[in-house]
Each structure stands twice: as structure tokens, then as C-alpha cells.
Amino acid sequence: MSYPPADDRLRHLIAQQVNCDVDTWKLAFWIANGIVKCPEIRAEFRRIEAAHAAGQPCGDRNCDTCFAAQFATPTQENPA
């Protein structure tokens, strides 16, 4: 079995990050579960994904993808 499990990957990845700042794995998983199940957060993931899939910036100031694209060297296939 691989870790994190494919059917619960997002929750496990969030719990790993949160676990550095909390006392127990149980608390980390409880927080991660709330994040993963939050409709507003899931909608924001979908919005960002749709913008990137369309080749558009998502508008999130913390987005590494959009930041990197802003400073990418233009090519013949992708002029600025």
C-alpha cells in the first residue's frame, strides 16, 4: 500500500502539513478533514483549476504557477 492512499490523498497531505504545528495526528486529521469537506474551499480549488486549464491566471497572489508564468521567457510558440 502506498502513502498517502489514492482515495484520501488530499486529506493526508493536508494533515502532514498541519501536523508540524499541532500536538497530535488525530488533531491534524480532524483539521484536514474540515478543510477537505468545506464547500467554499472545494469551490476555490475548482475555480483555480478551471482558470489554469483555460490558460488563464487564477488571480491568487500565492499561486506559484501564475507567479512563474509571469516571469517565463516568451517563446515563438508562446509569445508574450
Image (spheres, rainbow, N blue to C red):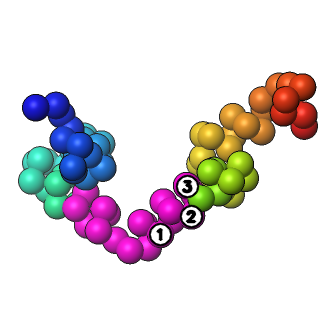
Q: Which residues are magenta?
A: 32-49
Count neighbours of disc 2 (C-alpha within 10 A) and say few if under 14, some if 14 to 19, many if 20 or more: few
Residue 65: which quarter of the image?
top right
Q: Are marks 3 and 2 in contact (CB under 8 Å)?
A: yes
Q: Could you tell me how far apart the alpha carbons at marks 3 and 2 are, in whole angstroms?
A: 5 Å
Q: Are marks 1 and 2 in contact (CB under 8 Å)?
A: yes
Reading the image, the residue beneath label 2 is 47
Drawn side of residue 54 relative to residue 31, left or right: right
Which residue is at a point 90% across and 34% down the rendered structure image? Answer: 79
The answer to whether 73 is drawn above or below residue 48 in the figure is: above
Drawn side of residue 20 relative to residue 77, left or right: left
Magenta span includes 71: no
Which residue is at a point 86% across and 25% down the rendered structure image? Answer: 75
Q: SS for tag 3? A: helix
Count neighbours of disc 3 (C-alpha within 10 A) and say few if under 14, some if 14 to 19, many if 20 or more: some
Q: Residue 28 at x, y = what percent?
A: 19, 52
Reading the image, the residue beneath label 3 is 49
Q: SS for tag 1? A: helix
